[in-house]
Image: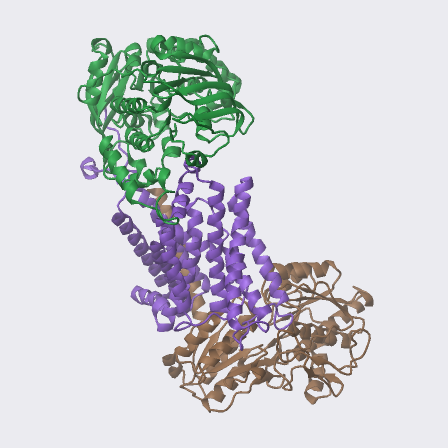
Amino acid sequence: MGQKVKEPRYHIVKRADISKREAWTIRIIAILAALLLCAIITMVCTGDNPISIFVTIFKGAFGTQRKTWITLQYVAILLIISLALTPAFKMQFWNVGGEGQVLMGGLAAAACMITLADKLPNAVVIILMIVSSILAGAIWGVIPAIFKALWNTNETLSTLMMNYIATQLVAYFTIVWEVPKGSGKIGIINQNSNVGWLPNIGNKYLLSIIVAAVVTIGMFIYLKFTKHGYEIEVVGESQNTARYVGISVEKVVIRTMLLSGAICGLAGLLLVGGINHTITTTISAGQGFTGVMVSWLAKFNPVAMIFTSLLIIFMSRGASEISTAFELNQSFADILTGIILFFIIGCEFFIRYKIVVRKDLGKEDA
Amino acid sequence: MKKIKKVLSAVLAATMVMSLVACSNTASTEKETASEASSTEATQTPASDVKVGFIFLHDENSTYDLNFINGATQACEAAGVEYMFKTNIPEGQECYEAACELADAGCDIVFADSFGHEDYMIEAAKEYPEVQFCHATGTKAHTENLSNYHNAFATIYEGRYLAGIAAGMKLNEMIANGEITEDQAKIGYVGAYTYAEVISGYTSFFLGARSVCPSATMEVTFTGSWYDETAEKEGANKLIEDGCVLLSQHADSMGAPTACEKAGVPDVSYNGSTASACPNTFIVSSRIDWAPYFAYIIDAVANKTEIATDWVGTLETGSVVLTDLGDAAAEGTAEAIAEAEKAMNAGTLHVFDTTTFTVNGETLSSYMADVDTDAEYTADTEVITDGYFAESGSEFRSAPYFDLQIDGISLLDTAY
Amino acid sequence: MENKEVAISLRGITKSFGEVTANSNVNLDVYKGEILSLLGENGSGKTTLMNMLAGIYYPDAGQIIINGKEAVIRSPRDAFDLGIGMVHQHFKLIDVFDATENIILGLEGKLNKKEAEKRIKEICDKYGFEINTKKKIYDMSVSEKQTVEIVKVLYRGADILILDEPTAVLTPQETEKLFNVMRNMKHDGKSLVIITHKLNEVQSISDRVAVLRHGEFISDMRTSKTNAQEMTDMMVGHSVSLNIERPDPVDPKPRIVVENLTVVDEEGIVKLDDVSFTANTGEILGIAGISGCGQKELLRAIAGLEIIKDGKITYIHQDGRTEDLLGKSPREISELGVKLSFVPEDRLGMGLVGNMNLADNMMLRSYRSGKSRFFTEKKEPRKLAEKVVDKLQVSTPSIDTPVRLLSGGNVQKVLVGREISSRPKVLLTAYAVRGLDISSSYQIYDLINQQKKRGAAVLFVGEDLDVLVELCDRVLVLCGGKVSGIVDGRNTDKYTLGSMMTQRGEAI
């Protein structure tokens, strides 16, 4: 036999299929590791003990009854947007235009509230708001879809560009409707008449949560048990297969983006009519993009999305609580959120691959 | 292995530096907790059980918010009361939630510093009638009929006028030195929005400058944001290219002052001194000192007296102040300012004296201003009295409402 | 054999992917100056074993000894340094580069095309390759691309060549050419390993044959001392019959009449040019041709998946009524009551959805039916999936397993099973046994024969001329999109077909 050659200390191997339990174990370990690192960093910066840091994170999200409700409301909105993006992504249509679709939905709702307040009864205004915001979101979603279907344009670019158009439209109307003149803000619309304010169910926060629950169940059923959902899956997996069995890919793309945009529009309606009662360019706060991550992390499973959106909201609220409680700059919260997301996304690598360490390590060294 | 060690040491070093920065950060903004407050015995009037919550749009990185944060810290520590800060609260539902959280946490007073916070403060005020909600720069307190919601502002136009005098003196000096001719005495102004507060600010500044340099003219550009460093820098550069020989601004970043420093153009700043960043071009800065107001509301709550619906700070209350003059200020500036200040306090000098300006070539004898906020911008109140425009003294409301376009000032863009 | 030097020695090689063991304790030697055939059914671990030599995978256990020294092959670069080169089934060439550029791509040192071309020419002359160094890859035929791949490996100084199913894409004539250069390389002292499961090729090219089964090494022997039946039995593990059945057609009647069909693709290239023929009931019509000569487009055109420029496709019902299929989508065709099934070449990219499980794949054809307009009906597809698994002996953990996890043969059984479940009147199959092992292939031939006996008109696009000659009643030969002729399967041989595939219009 020839001379001994050193075997590599470890090598990376692709996993075949990993069980769900194993995958979730890896994810949980990643989250724990992220929390640990956050704790260490915060500890180094503040000198507080890590337990109090974890308690603060938890308090930030669930510290008081109000905080819990707010957290749940945030989860609801993020969840709705994520659910809206899901059918498009499942179809492999990269809809990164959630931001714009939400904004357009919100803008339509705000337009109804502002222009119709004195002219129509409240109930009619609300109905018009619902219709117009859903329609506006749907239109904003379907324009890139039509371009894709007719001329095969790149939807990533077109949906992204539509975001900028939407932002500028909102900026324009902010100036048109600003109160007082020249202030560059609209402020709470119909603050005293409350026309166009979506009704409170129980308390201020419950409406969005109920809508989110309905959309979640609806989307779950739509994707899993309907012919449309089946077509979306086939188109997403292989357009060739879709054509082979006679599915019109163009029709499915357009129909799905109408739905995707419409639900984004619904989120815009809730943000404007139900929560903020105003419209600003930053009202969706990047959730059109965060939603992409929520959807991916949940592997497009609507039920799993409840947990991923909760996780992301919990983390970001916890991180921002740390930064206020320990008197740190807001950027510190962003750093912590970044660390957590890095771990969550990074752990997907270990779900797909495993590292094999040389087995006879001790033996050879001896 | 060597490589790993290298990386590790680099990471460790970075962590140490970061922690140092962060620690020094915390040290400088150390919060006064209840226990600490009792340990600092020096306080004169221990209004112990009052707790104040503050909501800030940004954090100490914004000159605007820093001014409030300093005032709040100073007033609360002087009064020995407990206080809580919430920074980086956007002008949306988050403000309402922050206000409610502060009220839930036992604050007797909740204060918000940004104009856009107003509506959300009103919402919170409706929900917590026993808590006092105070809002700076707002316009709605006098029409909302909420006993626990209050606006506050200061006669900053007086400070602007005085700063304008410093600018006029500088222009005179430049004319005298032959750097510019009389006709070239053009001032540039970077504003945020075409909003009354901004209009009132640049007009008073201009009137102050023109009171000492009669040939002065002014150009104004708007950025469409209260805080946009790039836009403010670009606006300033545009004005400098346009031939403006002196700049001032009403926006919250360091964009305009740094652009001036780079171009060597003298600058009258706002919200606080920019002398350290702009040693060669800084003339003076006017600002509102909020500590007197905070002291006032803490005192009112402690003694269970009413807080004014619209509170206006003045030169006399110490709310309107000028910073120390910069090296760029012309000789005799301090004296000229002191003289004007005396006349103002004596009531003989009004900033918006209708004899000092014209609108479309005519002197004003009557003007209906939009004092009560509404979506149609209805002009509702006669504001010309005794030959001057009665800007937000305590007459009508605390926030400025002067929105006239006077001759001598040209607006480059009015998109915002 | 013993006096020959050992080039590669594999000792106890084991490799698993998750639960699946691809190779288990394999011991194999390759000598200098010999051609070794590596034989085995699909999924027997041939490619995995060779990939470990090429640096694509790293073994979990075992030793690789190259020229007497233990070697660690962590990457393709390590493999090259040891003089090992592998030509994969799927070529790894850059289309817009020419042959020389592809060959020298990634090599260190100064780029000198002239020098490189000289060396390439030397290699070609030495072993008898024909190569146009200036030709762009996208202009090349499959066989030319393969030549570039082999020269690329030799250029890098490989002494040990591994060829993964090199003949799958070649005509008999091209195969013969390849074998000639392989023999030249052997005489030059190089070691060659050829992965294949065509037994006739094993016999004509190799000196020695090694058989793998289920990831385990079964045996190796001199090719001259064995025969097809013995090798098959070793591969499969039990005795199999090697004859393809060809029942006589019963009452053939025209079912599909294609007249003057012309198809032009998106780039304006003529894919089918004035093609006319008739497919009869109860008959298998074979379609032969070099790959890319319009076979795919012909089937796609009948299935309603091509935009047709000119011509006519007529379907004739049992009762003599006719339907014009031209310009109709697959959905419209099925709505006409035309029972047409299509087993496409691209099984997981077209015929099936890889990430879906068996039951959901069964739904592809039928999901529109069912009581509800809105909801899918899942019971029937599940029943069908179970039936297919049971009848065709599909080896799968369950009908909820994604089909991409099945082996090639089982994937094809699922696809064919679904397509024949609707009792088609017309069955279109493209390369139905490509990549399948012997037992799976025979099962597919049986299924196709069953459909023929049922009275379906079968169009069988194939590449193995031996099979076409043995299975089909008639064979239509395509060359460059034109029909070179239609021959009777009972009165022809593969050499006639081969020459018709390259030059048009010999026999009618």
| Spot occupied by residue B313 in the image (x, y as percentages of width and height) | 60, 83
Kindly indicate which chain is depicted in brown in the rendered structure. Answer: B
| Spot occupied by residue B341 in the image (x, y as percentages of width and height) | 69, 83
Asked if A245 appears above or below A155 in the picture, the reply is above
| Spot occupied by residue C115 in the image (x, y as percentages of width and height) | 50, 17
Query: In terms of depth relative to the viewer, which is nearer, C42 or B62?
Result: C42
What residue is at 49 percent from the left and 88 percent from the top? B299
Residue B270 appears left or right of B412: left
In this view, the residue farthest toward the front is C319
What residue is at 49 percent from the left and 22 percent from the top? C137
What residue is at 51 percent from the left and 30 percent from the top? C307
| Spot occupied by residue B403 in the image (x, y as percentages of width and height) | 69, 75
Q: Residue C191 falls in which quadrant of the image?
A: top left
Kindly indicate which chain is depicted in green in the rendered structure. Answer: C
Asked if A140 appears above or below C87 in the picture, the reply is below
Q: Indicate the colour of chain A.
A: purple
Q: Which quadrant: the N terminus of chain A? A: top left
Q: Residue B380 falls in which quadrant of the image?
A: bottom right
